[in-house]
Image: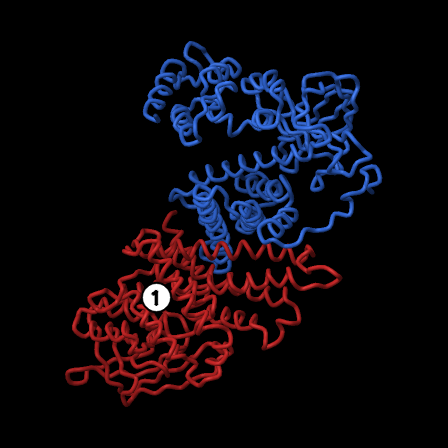
């Protein structure tokens, strides 16, 4: 089976993908929509899904045959059943009508953006206030989202809204797939402390979304969202293990090279600090390898949830030691080493705040891995409109 | 490389655990601590009957031919119980050194005694500094007729008083000493860790047999094996005291609720879990690498040495804090783990030293 499949996919790529120019055969440059359409039509984008939904009903092991062939040639569009969060969520939770209407368009277009966090709902995400009010067979949406990546490019966003303010906070939420290209959707880039602008604010004023674009059930959005976030964590986990493979191979770690370059490896105090920082990084890499092995064997690993928290200590620690290695030179941003050290010091917060702060992560580990009793949420169970905010 | 399958390994660990549940539980440990020898010989005999004392010994010398991988996992089991017999010196270091000896008749005689549980070995491997380094010269050997005589003092020798024989690291090589011989003086010290028996061994023209062929590389292998064994023991102890602490957080009530609901304690627990799992992972990796003679075995051994020692120290220290007042009593077992953790900080050299050696290994990649 897998030999025949490998042969088929190799043949198809020979016919369709120009590895040299990284685009479709006959094209001069990469055209996302037309290429993705080819891949989806061939059943290679979502091989684990049934034929009806553009797949081939393969096992994930068989799907890897396709992914590997694509990766080997640098061809795009593989593994959309693993990485396209919007499509995966619609596939898992959408009605057949919604799937028929949107799935093909989602798979052949850019990835969806995530309209989750709000200025008043970060760690406490169920506290979102963006309103969606029913008007005929549509909902009218008003409010603000924040920390949205790819908001400019995205055709659709996965949108969490408040649809019942009289219900307790987890019970009055509806989850939509939301068309971004319409009047009343304004995207403003955020200037981050690193100087980058990966994220945006999204202001939504009287924008519209059809009722049939609800993912899951009306007012049951928190439940649907749990499914989406589980897929997202899985994607992030896969990202972590994929990156590890690249880092493990024999090269001297960057921090060690920096210390060596600036002649700090003769200082016994600095040696201890550098060694411990390298150790934390290596230990986390070894833990994540173990997590991967456990996941392959048992389908789950409690170790995986430790990776992000461990990474915060690693990144903040390495940034602090990099600055020590450079000494007062770190104040002057003219050298690349200084710029990197200062950038890394700021960027470390991306890991310790983004995607759930370290403190929230510790609660999750304590409650879900160690089985300690859940913290009391005083806003749980009371009507949303009566919850204190500020 | 070990011949043991995963199932064999699990079976032998399970057997050891059952034995310790019966005879190495906390009450038994406390009773043993009260004795002068601090060593339960009956339990040792039962371990020998199960083949545990011959774990690293080749079957041709009556052992069961395991490797450091089995040793590491067995010590995870015994570490959980804070088992305190002379296992690392007798069943881990002595076999590595004796197997390397060119005089096979001599080696075989003693390896068989170890496998049978008849002889206890101490290792006189360091001087006053406590560092097991090549530079450390604390025993001088001189030719005396056919044999040798040793002069000097070895410090921090574990279980010297219970030992029948001692392997001494001297300036002219590695020697076997009968502890009953004249010229062997043992000064026992009171240690803060009640499970630890430390002595200074003074040799005054003590007769000795040279273990020919045992030199720096063999000593280094014995030390690496001991470090991984100790790392395993620390992992077992770390996990046990951690599990006990988490259980306490679930069952101790204050302010009408389990204290494990308070975030201050939750966050400490979550942070400690990283240390527990890191120690666990690296001890296993180091054992695998060392058993396979892998290129990175020295690097991983040093990493395991300071990580497992430091993480045990940290987890045991926080365990007392998380328990609160109950753990400030001798009756509660927390302090036993905490004291054993202090022991591990120094037994074969300090964490700072191994951290530095780990960095030296890393520098080879530059």
A93 lies left or right of B158:
right
Badge 1 marks a residue whose secondary structure is helix
From the rendered image, report the letter of the chain displayed in red. Answer: B
Chain designation of label 1: B
The one nearer the camera, A11 or A310, is: A11
Shade of chain A as shown in the rendered figure: blue
Q: Residue at x 44, y 41 (%)?
A: A296
From the viewer's perspective, is B37 left or right of B291? right
Task: Give the mark count.
Answer: 1
In the picture provided, is A271 more to the left or to the right than A328? left
Instruction: Give the quadrant of the C terminus of chain A.
Output: top right
Q: Foreground: A53 or A336? A: A53
The residue at the point 58 percent across, 37 percent down is A230
Q: Does residue B275 appear anywhere in the picture? A: yes
Placement of the N terminus of chain A among the 4 image quadrants: top left
Examine the rendered structure and indicate whether residue A360 appears above or below residue B254.
above
**Residue for badge 1:** B223
Furthest residue in direction right, as rendered: A386
Location of residue B280 with respect to A216 vertically, above or below: below
Closest to the observer, B358 or A363: A363
Up-down relation of residue A225 to residue A293 (above or below): above
Q: Residue at x 27, y 86 (%)?
A: B206
From the viewer's side, name the closer residue of B133 and B338: B338
| Colouring convention used in this rendered image of the protein | by chain
* In the image, farthest residue toward the left: B146
Residue A327 appears in the picture as rendered:
no
Most extreme residue toward the bottom is: B182
- Where is residue A18 shown, x and y percent of the image? 40, 16
In the drawing, does residue A353 fall left or right of residue B165? Answer: right
């Amino acid at each position: 089976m897998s030999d025949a499949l490998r042969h088929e996919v190799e043949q198809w790529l020979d016919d369709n993908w120009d590895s040299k120019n990284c685009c479709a055969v006959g094209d001069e440059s990469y055209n996302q929509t037309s290429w993705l359409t080819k891949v989806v039509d061939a059943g290679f984008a979502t091989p684990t899904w049934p034929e009806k939904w553009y797949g081939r009903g393969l096992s994930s092991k068989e799907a890897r045959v396709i992914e590997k062939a694509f990766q080997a040639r640098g061809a795009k569009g593989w593994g959309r059943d693993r990485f396209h969060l919007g499509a995966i969520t619609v596939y898992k939770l959408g009605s057949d009508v919604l799937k028929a209407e949107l799935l093909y368009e989602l798979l052949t277009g850019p990835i969806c953006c995530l309209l989750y966090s709000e200025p008043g709902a970060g760690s406490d995400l169920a506290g979102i206030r963006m309103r969606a009010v029913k008007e005929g067979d549509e909902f009218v949406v008003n409010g603000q989202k924040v920390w949205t990546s790819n908001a400019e490019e995205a055709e659709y966003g996965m949108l969490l809204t408040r649809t019942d303010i009289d219900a307790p906070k987890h019970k009055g939420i509806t989850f939509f797939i939301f068309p971004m290209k319409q009047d009343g959707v304004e995207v403003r880039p955020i200037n981050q402390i690193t100087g980058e602008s990966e994220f945006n604010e999204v202001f939504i004023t009287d924008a519209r979304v059809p009722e049939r674009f609800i993912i899951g059930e009306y007012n049951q959005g928190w439940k649907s969202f749990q499914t989406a976030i589980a897929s997202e964590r899985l994607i992030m986990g896969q990202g972590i293990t994929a990156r590890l493979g690249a880092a493990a191979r024999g090269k001297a770690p960057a921090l060690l090279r920096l210390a060596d370059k600036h002649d700090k490896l003769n200082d016994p105090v600095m040696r201890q600090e550098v060694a411990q920082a390298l150790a934390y990084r290596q230990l986390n890499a070894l833990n994540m390898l173990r997590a991967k092995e456990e996941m392959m064997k048992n389908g789950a690993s409690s170790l995986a949830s430790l990776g992000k928290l461990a990474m915060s200590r690693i990144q903040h620690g390495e940034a602090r030691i990099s600055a020590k290695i450079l000494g007062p030179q770190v104040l002057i941003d003219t050298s690349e080493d200084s710029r990197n050290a200062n950038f890394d010091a700021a960027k470390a917060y991306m890991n310790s705040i983004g995607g759930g702060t370290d403190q929230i992560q510790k609660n999750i580990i304590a409650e879900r891995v160690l089985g300690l009793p859940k913290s009391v949420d005083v806003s749980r169970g009371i009507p949303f409109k009566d919850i204190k905010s500020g | 490389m070990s011949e043991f399958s995963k199932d064999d390994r699990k079976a032998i660990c399970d057997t050891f655990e059952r034995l310790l549940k019966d005879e190495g539980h906390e009450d038994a440990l406390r009773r043993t601590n009260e004795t002068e020898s601090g060593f339960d010989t009956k339990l040792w005999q039962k371990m020998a009957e199960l083949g545990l004392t011959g774990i690293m010994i080749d079957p041709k010398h009556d052992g069961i031919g395991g490797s450091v991988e089995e040793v590491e996992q067995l010590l995870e089991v015994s570490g959980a119980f804070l088992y305190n017999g002379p296992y690392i010196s007798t069943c881990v270091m002595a076999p590595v050194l004796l197997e390397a000896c060119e005089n096979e008749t001599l080696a075989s005689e003693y390896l068989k005694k170890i496998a049978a549980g008849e002889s206890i070995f101490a290792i006189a491997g360091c001087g006053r500094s406590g560092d097991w380094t090549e530079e450390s010269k604390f025993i001088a050997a001189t030719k005396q007729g056919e044999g040798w005589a040793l002069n000097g003092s070895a410090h921090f020798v574990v279980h010297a008083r219970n030992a029948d024989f001692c392997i001494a690291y001297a300036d002219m090589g590695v020697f076997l000493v009968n502890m009953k011989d004249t010229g062997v003086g043992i000064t026992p010290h009171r240690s803060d860790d009640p499970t630890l028996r430390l002595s200074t061994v003074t040799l005054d023209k003590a007769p000795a047999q040279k273990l020919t062929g045992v030199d720096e590389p063999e000593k280094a292998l014995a030390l690496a094996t001991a470090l991984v064994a100790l790392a395993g023991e620390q992992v077992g102890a770390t996990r046990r005291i951690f599990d006990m602490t988490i259980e306490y957080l679930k069952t101790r009530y204050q302010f009408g609720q389990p204290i494990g609901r308070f975030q201050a304690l939750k966050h400490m627990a979550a942070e400690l879990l990283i240390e527990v799992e890191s120690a666990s992972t690296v001890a296993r990796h180091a054992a695998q690498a060392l058993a396979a003679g892998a290129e990175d075995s020295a690097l991983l051994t040093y990493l395991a040495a300071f990580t497992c020692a430091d993480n045990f120290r940290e987890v045991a220290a926080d365990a007392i804090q998380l328990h609160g007042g109950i753990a400030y009593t001798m009756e509660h077992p927390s302090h036993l783990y905490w004291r054993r953790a202090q022991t591990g900080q120094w037994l074969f050299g300090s964490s700072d030293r191994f951290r530095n050696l780990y960095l030296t290994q890393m520098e080879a990649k530059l």
